[in-house]
Image (spheres, coloured by chain):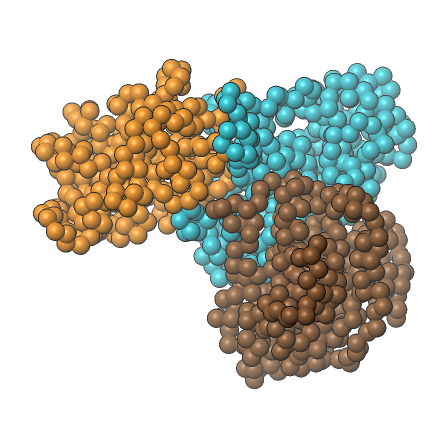
Amino acid sequence: MTELQNKIRELLEDHTVDLVIGWENGSLPLVSSPVFIKKAEDAGKVNFDVTCRNNLTTYLTKDRRQLGKDYQKIGIVVKGCDARSVVLYVTENQVKREKVFLIGVPCQGVLEKKKIFDICEGREVLEKRVEGENIIFKGHAFEIKVPFNDVLSDSCLGCRYPDAREFDAFIGTPRGELEKKDEFKVVDDFEKKTPEERWAYIKDEYSRCIRCYACRNVCPSCYCNECFVDHNDPQWIGKTPEVTDNIIFHLIRNLHLAGRCVDCGACVSACPVNLDLRIMNKKVEKEMKDRFNYTAGLDINEKPAMATYCENEKQDFIMG
Amino acid sequence: MCNTYLPFPMKVERIITENPDRTLRTFDLSFINEEDREKFIYMPGQFCEFSILGKGESPFGIASSPTEEGILKFTVSRTGSVTREIHYLQEGDIVGIRGPLGNWYPEQLMQNEDVVIIGGGFAFTTLRSMIVYMLAHRERYGKITVIYGARTPEYFIFKEELETWDARDDITLHLTIDKPYPGWEKLVGFVPTVTGEVNLDPKALVLVCGPPVMIKYTLPVLTKIGFKDEKIFTSLERRMKCGIGKCGRCGIGSKYICIDGPVFSLAELNKIPEAF
Amino acid sequence: MYKFKIVYLPEFLEYLQEKYTLWAPAKSGTETEFKVISSFAEIDQSRLNTTLNPKEIFFPRREVLFSYDENGIKTPPPPEKPVAVWGLRTCDTRSIRMLDEVFSNAHQMPEKEMFKDPYWINKYADSLLISQACRQPLSTCFCNWFNSGPFDETGSDIFVIKGEVNYYLKGISDKGQEVLAGFAKAEQTDEKDAAEIKDLQAAAESYMSPALDISDLKSKLDKIWDDPLWEEIGAKCINCGACAYICPTCHCFDVSDEGKAGKGKRVRLWDACMFQLFTKEASGHNPRSNSLNRVRQRVMHKYNYFVDNYQKFLCTGCGRCVSVCPVNMDIREIIKKILAHEI
């Protein structure tokens, strides 16, 4: 049994928590699955590896809010970004800090399926193996060895805080804060394009959206009881999966996430049609950083950026 | 090819506000095209999709009886965006109608039988249709007993008609309100209680229609009196879109309310998960 | 059985285009979906399964039912040419045939014209479904659970097997045979070809995991409607519509008005039973407000209710939902859990 599994068993045995949300091996080689552990003897199911893309804290809110009622205290395994979501919940009064027990794990980054698909030229991966700095993908009649970084999700490549900074127990050796000089490079590059080019890109991407709302539903920060797209009377937005309504959905979601996106990448990995959902979120994150020097989920005592006002804040948007 | 998704136009002839807080209105509609009128053959219990172009459509039970030729009657409670638009209609406006849809009360089984009709609130619409139909063919049926409950006397719909029925001796009407009310001399008490008190003959066939909570508490009373599940019929409601068993919205178990219902016997409902 | 050299495919497709509007898998951004194509070059068959499914061809994600203005209502004109689809997998073809039972066969009441869906029928009528054998099924494929397999011809008008140098084509329906007979480059196959096909089929089938016996699934589901098992199955579901939208057999839809009172369109849009809004009534009451109830509804509809109405499962084992689910709700695992569950 791993150290993580032991810890979970211990927490359930001594009734520190009555539920642990973690990951277990999924049914496919590149996918892990969320798992809800209620009995100490099931702790052995829990696993943590490079396929654990989900931000499990999303189960603490939405119509899962009742988890908080059904359980006295919930243990939850968190990567750096996931722990930031909990911090966000606490600052936004969605979750009481004492109701959750955070089991921090040091995160090496998680795989992005799309990159693997491209590297393997569409061939199906049946096995994966991490070997030092490399990862090996095997399928029918092929084996490919690539540097780990080539198949990490963009969120992980830009990640500065791989360890949970907020935790009640930490399993493993923390990686420490990473120096990422080009965190917003993708945004900077995008901003260099002409407005027409940017618009064309956004339009092309969002025209493919099928409005399954997987991005919204996996997102820990999208916890509105009733999302504006579901509001019927008045109806704010057309239900049609057509480009105009799709753009309204995604851009409003972007704005709702201002100062609230922890760049966990859950939306990107959930999208069944692989839309570039990150670029606009990252743009909004950059704006928040530039204007308010605010990064979501870092300080549990800080007020949410959009819920506070300082006189010396930049107000150039008013001046035009 | 027949296209059931296309509404045909009808004209609003008359609007009656049924209750003091103006949330219930009855709309009498007339056919604009003769061929639509000829094609529209229906039975009490069926429903239509009522369309306001640009706003959408909603299903409503038909409150008129096939014996009232040339008009269709719907009573609409203002709850959401479509029903609000319907309430904004004025006499002379044109609306879209699709139907008749769904099945109907078991009129064939009711022939030569005593019939008990139990209704509550504004869900009395298709029951009104059935009663008017039975009174027009009075000789076909045995004893007709009606139990109808509302919050206060003001919340009965079709008030004028209730008075004429009450005056007839070939139909027994038990009107009841929830709480005592100044000037009310008829029954006081909830529908389930009244149902247990008016000496119903369990050989009769029963039609029950009303708010879910009324149905929930009335059914056990009927069973206790001795009514068989096969002889108790009720009409269900769910969100609906297509009305022809495709869109999946009104599915309960393997049945679709829009084509297998809305009228089901209690015996059928007992076999369907999610029915209640 | 006919054959023609692989290089003649563009010519064959052009031949089809004389009479048909041709649909085939094509790139859409990073993904592949069925699109109307004008030339062979647009075809993308790098994936076994298209990301989006072929129901789009006959049941688009947004379809205008009619437009209206001061002159009344107008339905969209029926398509000029019938549809031919190249690049379907055998599971895709079977799924289209299933949807046809729902939309054209009038809910088992063929005498009732009013239950037929003219929008589906207009596009589906006279269509030519060309399915292709899967030479290397994916690990997510489970068509063999449903008495099918990578070389299943059922439902196809023409069944195609890609060999090393030839396409082998079998006319299954009269329509399919006629089309093949009219293509000048098509030759009759010989014994050597039959041997190649046999080998290919054996190779393809060797990629499939053994089929699970699901003959008890329906009767099991009949008994577990209010079993706590659903909590175990559905707890991790986030209630998005990814599975329903990429499913080739899910067909629930919404009807919505676009535009204003005087001028606009009534459209139908794909919808999914996974959403709160699907059953939420104007009063605010929702008979299926609980997320677990919605998971149960989807499983029950596919493997229980549909069987009641159409005597078959509403699933062809294409595996798309298995690979896209953001939380690894693997329908195969769910079925296994249900079958193994002691009541």
**Labels in figure, total:** 0
Furthest-bottom residue in view? A14
Q: Image check: B167 left or right of B55?
A: left
Chain C in the picture: what colour? cyan
Q: Is residue C243 visible?
A: no
Task: Say which residue appears at 50% left-offset and 23% top-offset.
Answer: C70
Furthest-front residue in view? A319
Q: Which chain is in orange here?
A: B
- Looking at the rendering, which quadrant does residue A278 occupy? bottom right
Instruction: Examine the rendered structure and indicate whether residue C316 appears above or below residue A68.
Output: above
Instruction: Examine the rendered structure and indicate whether residue B119 appears above or below residue A185.
Output: above
Foreground pick, B108 / C60: C60
Indicate the position of residue C125 as horizontal and vertical percent values. Answer: 63, 22
Q: Image check: A296 left or right of A177?
A: left
Q: Image check: C81 left or right of C6?
A: left
Indicate the position of residue C270 as horizontal and vertical percent values. Answer: 59, 40
- Looking at the rendering, which quadrant does residue C61 occupy? top right
Task: Say which residue appears at 84% left-offset and 73% top-offset.
Answer: A179
Foreground pick, B89 / C38: B89
Foreground pick, C187 / B55: B55
Q: Which chain is in brown here?
A: A
Foreground pick, B39 / C126: B39
Task: Say which residue appears at 59% left-offset and 24% top-offset.
Answer: C76
Indicate the position of residue B124 as horizontal and vertical percent values. Answer: 27, 39
Indicate the position of residue A185 as horizontal and vertical percent values. Answer: 83, 60
Instruction: Examine the rendered structure and indicate whether residue B132 appears above or below residue B173.
Output: above
Task: Say which residue appears at 34% left-offset and 38% top-offset.
Answer: B76
Q: Image check: A111 left or right of C251?
A: right
- Looking at the rendering, which quadrant does residue B240 occupy? top left
Instruction: Examine the rendered structure and indicate whether residue A145 appears above or below residue A141.
Output: below
Q: Is residue C178 visible?
A: yes
Quadrant (top left, top right, bottom left, bottom right) of the N terminus of chain C:
top right
